[in-house]
Image: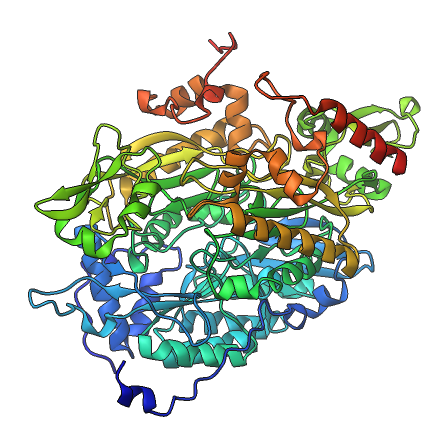
């Protein structure tokens, strides 16, 4: 039995209502733990005063420089003693999950047992970077808890100016839209950078994210310094039985208004069957005895919309791989940046091809480490030096798929033009 | 270190096993492992349930339920009990902290849903629903929070409970909350983010000892911070006319307190979309600010969010995400329909802002 709960009139109001309540969960833990009784006390104080009371510090595990988020209370009395002394230290361990965040219950139960013994018993599944967050341990218990998680086969994630924990979608494990083995690429890339994850020494954070298709369920384009987003080069596949089944259920109005009208390049058309074209780049499938859809795949930007609406009737092609975009990040310091295309297409179907992605990631991190300013993200660095300079360093040929449009101003020195054209022509001839 | 301490025998410490990201194969549901990379299509027999069919003909039903994300071990064990009973002891989590149970027999779906709901876990969050709110740490654990995270989410999801359990929106609605302007909650159809309105209040007694001053100066996006001697101590000062109150100086220099119970407000942003479906991905835009940080249930924020969701639900066409809908109806109509005031603060003046101005006569009257 733990000590008596502090009065928490504010937090109590978060116990009502139908959504699962974290306050109810904390109170359940507080039955056995003075630690959580005092955590509730401090949190109630934050609700009263609308202020946070944690400060950082330096806490880690032996051999690593990051992965633990230290928290010490700042809520002190007149003598400088913690008001809620039992939760004066409340550190978080960031642990990297398996790709796709799959678990068996034996593993989850073991997590619970370890964290009930050495920590607060509060676990967040998952943090915004994808970590399992074991929230709340004293400085003394951090090492013991980590040792037990580590013996289970789990390792600390990233924090600070380091390669950060990554995320990949459910992907090939359960999604027909998957265009590469996300888990394989995720592990191959991340496990190359364990030193940069565990011992923060980069100019700033570097995040990889892996989405299996352009729906980008991992939000990688907006958040990842390197986003690996699945795509395909050949034609959209079709299935007539499923197309007809879809049409029976949804009809012509929905086909026209929800699919044809929403195709961003207007390459998706519905036609009388007798008017359907044939050709190397055409996908077509009958939806009824009289009508069919026709897609000219050369004009398709692989946006996924028609495939999302008519799942199964339409499917991604079979010549699959990924587009790699670099430089995504949120507001600080220069404003939000999306990742931009650096590799329009890379095959990831064999270990050798995945190794090429790893090699590109390695060279990007090396360049970032050498050239970024302190606290500058990759996207900001590229904004500062220009994409061309980054591509030069990466030995990647320029490609019009990397831009929305060519340059809109004359402020560029072009006396190397003829040499560049000669290089492009020489490469064409060699190919 | 003195000689005596150096001479003491070193304590043997366990070296970490640098194993990195673990393989997920042993954690996969047997049917997911068997059909890895070989799925054909899926449909949604009811809200909260995904039905995937493989090229081999195998079928798997995934039942999705909401959680509080910040879970106590008892809650996790309860979810494990349910997985042991119905889902071959396997679960997975989504990016929005929903849990998924995979079942190989359609007959188990209804009893599983009944058990989850009886245990207090709402089933939903699939397709065109309002899904669980991506969120951060807040007062519970962050060192720089302007507000709470789990509490805001709990209060809002209580209000959006029915929309989580139904698929009645024009398209999916992703929400996020962030307790400072760093926006760890991320881009979303609707995001709630702290917006400070006053420059930081500096404790000049502490700056010299706590802050690396050049780092703090370099961190400011508008170069409003400069070194200064204050009361005879090395400190920092702020050009308050330049300062736009982003709070970027606060993490590297906690004596520059940016959080304020009254003047740290909440802003609402709309139209973020990470998917490439239809249009290219979009960043969200600020549409409201000045909402009070009114713990414990943030009623003003909840009302504002519900209003936007309601107008979107009534007005958007099928498959239009928030950004698609606004692109069709235009920003003037968005502000008219939602009743939100369009103030001068919503006209972008940051770098690249001219791209956000209307350089045409395209105006809807």
User: Residue at position x 42%, y 57% from top?
Assistant: A160
| Residue A76, picture quadrant | bottom left
**Residue under the point 42% across and 74% down:** A61
Residue situated in front as seen by the camera: A267 or B167:
A267
Q: Nearer the viewer, residue B359 or A262?
A: B359
Q: Tell me which residue sits at (41%, 81%) in the image.
A: A144
Q: Is residue B105 above or below residue B196?
A: below
Q: Is residue B311 left or right of residue B205?
A: right
Q: Is residue A333 above or below residue B165?
A: above
**Residue at coordinates 49% horizontally, 47% vertically from top-left?**
B131
Residue B170 occupies quadrant: top right
> Which quarter of the rendering shows the C terminus of chain A?
top right
Q: How is the image coloured?
A: rainbow
Quadrant assignment for the N terminus of chain A = bottom left
Q: Picture coordinates of residue A422 (x, y %)?
A: 80, 28
Where residue B37 appears, as percent x and y from the top left, is 76, 58
A121 relative to A191 in the view: left or right: left
Number of callouts: 0
Residue B320 in sight: yes
Can see residue A311? Answer: no
Give the x, y percent position of residue B54.
Answer: 78, 57
Q: Position of residue A44 (x, y in %)?
A: 21, 59
Quarter residue A27 falls in: bottom left
């Amino acid at each position: 039995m733990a000590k008596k709960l502090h009065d928490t009139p504010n937090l109590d109001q978060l116990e009502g209502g139908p959504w699962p309540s974290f306050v109810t969960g904390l109170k359940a833990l507080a039955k056995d733990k003075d630690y959580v009784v005092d955590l509730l006390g401090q949190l109630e104080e934050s609700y009263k005063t609308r202020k946070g009371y944690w400060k950082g510090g330096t806490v880690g595990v032996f051999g690593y420089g990051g992965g633990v988020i230290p928290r010490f209370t700042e809520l002190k009395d007149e003598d400088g003693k913690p008001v809620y002394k039992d939760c004066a230290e409340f550190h978080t361990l960031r642990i990297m999950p398996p790709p796709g965040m799959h678990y068996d219950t034996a593993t989850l139960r073991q997590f619970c047992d370890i964290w009930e013994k050495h920590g607060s018993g509060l676990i967040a599944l998952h943090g915004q970077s994808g970590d399992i967050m074991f929230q709340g341990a004293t400085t003394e218990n951090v090492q013991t808890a980590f040792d037990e998680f580590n013996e289970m086969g789990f390792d600390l994630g990233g924090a600070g100016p380091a390669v950060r924990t990554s995320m990949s979608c459910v992907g090939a494990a359960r999604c027909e839209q998957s265009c590469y083995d996300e888990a394989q690429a995720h592990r191959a890339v991340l496990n190359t950078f364990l030193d940069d994850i565990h011992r923060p020494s980069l100019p700033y954070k570097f995040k990889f994210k892996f989405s299996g298709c352009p729906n980008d369920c991992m939000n990688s384009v907006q958040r990842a310094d390197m986003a690996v987003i699945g795509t395909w080069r050949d034609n959209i596949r079709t299935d007539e039985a499923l197309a007809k089944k879809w049409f029976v259920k949804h009809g012509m109005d929905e086909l026209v208004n929800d699919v044809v009208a929403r195709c961003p390049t207007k390459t998706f058309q519905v036609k009388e069957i007798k008017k359907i074209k044939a050709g190397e780049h055409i996908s077509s499938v009958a939806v009824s005895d009289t009508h069919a859809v026709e897609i000219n795949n050369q004009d398709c930007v692989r946006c996924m919309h028609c495939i999302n609406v008519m799942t199964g009737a339409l499917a991604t092609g079979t010549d699959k791989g990924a587009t790699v975009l670099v430089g995504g990040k949120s507001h600080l310091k220069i404003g939000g940046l999306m990742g931009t295309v650096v590799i329009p297409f890379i095959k990831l179907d064999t270990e050798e091809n995945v190794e090429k992605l790893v090699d590109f990631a390695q060279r990007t991190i090396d360049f970032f480490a050498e050239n970024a300013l302190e606290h500058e993200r990759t996207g900001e660095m590229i904004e500062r030096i220009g994409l061309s300079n980054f591509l030069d360093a990466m030995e990647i040929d320029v490609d019009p798929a990397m831009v929305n449009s060519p340059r809109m101003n004359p402020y560029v020195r072009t006396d190397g033009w003829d040499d560049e054209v000669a290089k492009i022509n020489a490469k064409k001839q060699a190919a | 270190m003195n000689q005596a301490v150096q001479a003491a025998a070193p304590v043997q410490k366990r070296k970490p096993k640098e194993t990195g990201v673990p393989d997920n194969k042993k954690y996969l549901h047997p049917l997911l492992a068997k059909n890895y990379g070989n799925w054909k299509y899926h449909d949604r027999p009811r809200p909260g349930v995904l039905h995937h069919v493989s090229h081999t003909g195998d079928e798997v039903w995934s039942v999705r339920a909401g959680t509080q994300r910040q879970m106590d071990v008892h809650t996790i064990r309860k979810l494990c009990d349910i997985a042991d009973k119905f889902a071959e002891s396997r679960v997975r989590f989504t990016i929005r902290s929903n849990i998924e149970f995979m079942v190989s027999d359609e007959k188990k779906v209804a009893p599983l849903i009944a058990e989850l709901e009886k245990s207090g876990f709402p089933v939903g969050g699939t397709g065109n629903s309002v899904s669980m709110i991506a969120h951060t740490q807040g007062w519970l654990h962050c060192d720089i929070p302007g507000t709470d995270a789990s509490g805001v989410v709990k209060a809002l999801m209580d209000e959006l409970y029915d929309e989580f359990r139904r698929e009645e929106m024009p398209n999916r609605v992703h929400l996020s909350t962030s307790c400072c302007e760093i926006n760890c909650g991320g881009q979303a159809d609707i995001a709630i983010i702290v917006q400070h309105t006053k420059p930081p209040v500096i404790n000049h007694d502490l700056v010299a000892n706590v802050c690396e001053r050049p780092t703090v100066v370099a961190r400011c996006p508008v170069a409003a911070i400069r070194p200064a001697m204050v009361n005879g101590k090395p400190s920092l000062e702020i050009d308050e006319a330049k300062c736009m109150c982003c709070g970027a100086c606060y993490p590297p220099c906690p004596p520059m307190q940016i959080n304020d119970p009254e003047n740290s407000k909440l802003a609402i942003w709309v139209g973020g979309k990470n998917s490439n479906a239809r249009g290219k991905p979009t960043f969200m835009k600020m549409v409201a600010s000045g909402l009070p940080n009114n713990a414990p249930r943030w009623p003003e924020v909840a009302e504002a969010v519900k209003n936007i969701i309601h107008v979107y639900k009534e007005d958007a066409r099928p498959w239009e995400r928030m950004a698609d809908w606004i692109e069709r109806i235009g920003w003037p109509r968005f502000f008219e329909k939602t009743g939100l005031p369009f103030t001068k603060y919503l006209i972008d003046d940051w770098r690249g802002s001219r791209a956000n101005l209307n350089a045409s006569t395209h105006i809807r009257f």
